[in-house]
Amino acid sequence: MAKKQFFITAEEGLHARPAAALVSEANRFHCELSLEFKDRTVNLKSILGVMGLGIPTRSTITIHADGQDAQEAILGTATLLEAQGMIDSR
């Protein structure tokens, strides 16, 4: 299992467009991916789950990956969030 914490810095928080891009990126991988925010955990491959968290700016999230390509999935999602200007990794 792999995990990484991120600090959301975008003014709008993790809103629809970057959330959709994140879910799309997550679906490229075979491992199980989840997103944790405020003691709630959702499937990162589900747009409804991610949007349902309502993640605002200045929030800390954790992405968990479990499976054969877990490390690649963490790197891929981190790269996407950074490219979208959404995060400051911790």
Image (cartoon, rainbow, N blue to C red):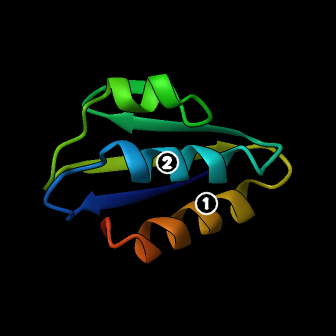
- Quadrant where the C terminus sits is bottom left
Left or right: where 53 falls relative to 56: right
Mark identifier at residue 74 = 1
Left or right: where 90 falls relative to 69: left
Q: Residues within 10 Å of mark 2 (few under 14, many from 20)?
A: many
Q: Is residue 1 visible?
A: no
Q: Give residue 63's position: percent from left, percent from top.
A: 49, 48
Q: Residue at x 35, y 60 (%)?
A: 6
Q: Is residue 30 visible?
A: yes
Q: Residue at x 41, y 53 (%)?
A: 18
Q: Residue at x 45, y 76 (%)?
A: 83
Left or right: where 81 falls relative to 44: left
**Secondary-structure class at tag 1:** helix
Circle 1: residue type: Ile
From what the image shows, is residue 65 above or below residue 58?
A: above
Q: Quadrant of residue 37?
A: top left
* Nearer to us in this view, 69 or 26: 26
Mark identifier at residue 63 = 2
Q: Give residue 47's position: percent from left, percent from top.
A: 51, 31
Q: Give residue 50's position: percent from left, percent from top.
A: 43, 32
Q: Residue at x 46, y 24 (%)?
A: 49
Q: Residues within 10 Å of mark 1 (few under 14, many from 20)?
A: many
Q: Earlier in the sequence, mark 1 or mark 2?
A: 2
Left or right: where 41 falls relative to 6: right
* Nearer to us in this view, 35 or 22: 22
Circle 2: residue type: Ile
Q: Quadrant of residue 71?
A: bottom right
**Secondary-structure class at tag 2:** strand
Tag 1 near tag 2, CB within 8 Å: yes
From what the image shows, is residue 39 above or below residue 16?
A: above
